[in-house]
Image: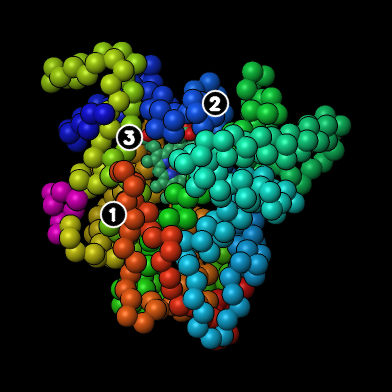
Amino acid sequence: MLVLPSKYVNEMRMLPSTIASPTVAHAHNLMGRHTNMNIILRNNLHFRTLQLKLTPNLSFLTAPMQEELNYAIDKELPNCEDWVIIKPYHSILKLVARISARIFLGLPLCRDENWLEISTEFTENGEWDDFRKGHRYIRKAKKLLVPEIKRRRQATAAGKPSTENSNLLSWMMEIASEAEGDAASLAHLEVVMSLDSIHTSQMNAVHVLYDLVARPEYITPIRDEIREVSKEDGAWMKWEKPSFTKLRKLDSFMRESQRFNPPTLISMHRVMMQDHQFADGTVIPRNAHVSMAVNAIQNDPEVTPEPRTFDGLRYYKLRQQDCESHLHQFSTTQEKILNFGHGANSCPGRFFASLEIKIILVRLIMDYEYKFPDGKGRPENVRAHEFIFPNPEGELLMRRRSTSERLAI
Ligand code: HEM
């Protein structure tokens, strides 16, 4: 694998997939031949559906996401007036999985325990240590989703009005070409999407929570900002997507937390489909697997001054000074900020991820307080290859805040 210097980012992001393929690289990283993930080499319907349907419809999806979070919190978090120990990695995984399922499949299927198991455990068990488990989860997903896809098709053909249209599965069915749209492939792509989305968002939310507990001086300004939005926009269930956009301090803290805890040290993977010569004459040969050192690039002092200082309001301050304030948002990619990639092939789910993480964090920050167990601080991150995870066994003490302090639902 070649890790390229950052001067090639712009040239790299302009190259078409016929020259530098992100999908071949992604399939390679996922060991696609063994894990059954090679479907992405012949079908990019999931990518298009995220870009063409999910992102433009985020405004309509905000209320169902909030509603599902309310349900998930009742189901998954302890209703505790006194301190209890939780493992945030696991608790937040369940919240993210439930909200994602609501948007990926719709009601009532999103509450099916089999689906929740498939979507959360596929990544953990299937991919890395036991390939057979991965295949078993894909078979299970097909068994669960194929009858549902057929039922939705019959309902559409019969012209029956359906309340199930605003979710990823129905959108994929709507825009699929004849070659892409067989029920088994759609079910398979739902698993691919869970793999791309659930752990990435969950880990980000866990890092933010740990960083907030480790740096309690940020909790009051972030809570005050949330209260300001409540004053303007009303009770939680009345909040719409723009309400979450107003949370600039939280957004900044999320971006800084991601800088300190990037999901991976290298990103923007591409496999060269043919020899290619960059403008400076450097030739990258066919079949080379190239990537960018995202972490080293964004922590260069020329890109991020005083990179070793955690400044939760760094991007908030930049947004106040800068006329290009949108450049410093959590979901914005830049030539030197590459946690979501950059260019046409950057993460198509990042706007959804940003909204989903904020929806979860607002409730967790307003309705609970936290501390680390006695004598312990922020759990050390875990590294596997180039990936960085919050420690799955890390613990926090948590208790509900009083009714007057909690969000008005
Ligand atoms: C904080 C959360 C997330 C992070 C850090 C993240 C990061 C990334 C990165 C670095 C890439 C590769 C970009 C490139 O090659 O240039 C990517 C691709 C992708 N992401 Fe995300 N992502 C996140 C959340 C999501 C979510 C929520 C979804 C779906 C709703 C999603 C769907 C995808 C898809 C479909 C791809 C393309 C890979 C494929 O073809 O299967 N991601 N993401």
Is residue 304 magenta-colored? Answer: yes
Distance between the alpha carbons at the discs numbered 2 and 1:
32 Å
Residue located 56% across and 85% down the image: 81
Image coords of residue 39 (percent x, y):
54, 26
Image coords of residue 311 (percent x, y):
24, 65
Rate crowding at label 3 as few (under 14), some (14 to 19) or many (20 or more) other CA atoms within 10 Å.
Answer: many
Q: Can you identify the residue that label 1 sits on?
A: 259
Q: Can you identify the residue that label 2 sits on?
A: 39
Q: Do residues under tags 2 and 3 come within 8 Å of each other at their CB atoms?
A: no
Image coords of residue 233 (percent x, y):
54, 69
Majority SS type along the magenta span: loop
Label placed on residue 268: 3
Query: Mark 2 or mark 3: which comes first in sequence?
Result: 2
Left or right of 8, for residue 97: right
Which quadrant would the C terminus be assigned to in this image? bottom right
Residue 252 appears in the figure: no
Amino acid beneath label 3:
Met
Rate crowding at label 2 as few (under 14), some (14 to 19) or many (20 or more) other CA atoms within 10 Å.
Answer: some
Query: Mark 2 or mark 1: which comes first in sequence?
Result: 2
Q: Would you place residue 100 above or below residue 161 in this image? A: below
Residue 163 appears in the figure: yes
Distance between the alpha carbons at the discs numbered 2 and 3:
20 Å
Instruction: Establish whether ligand 1 lies closer than 8 Å to the Cβ of label 3.
Output: yes
Amino acid beneath label 2:
Ile
Q: Do residues under tags 2 and 1 come within 8 Å of each other at their CB atoms?
A: no
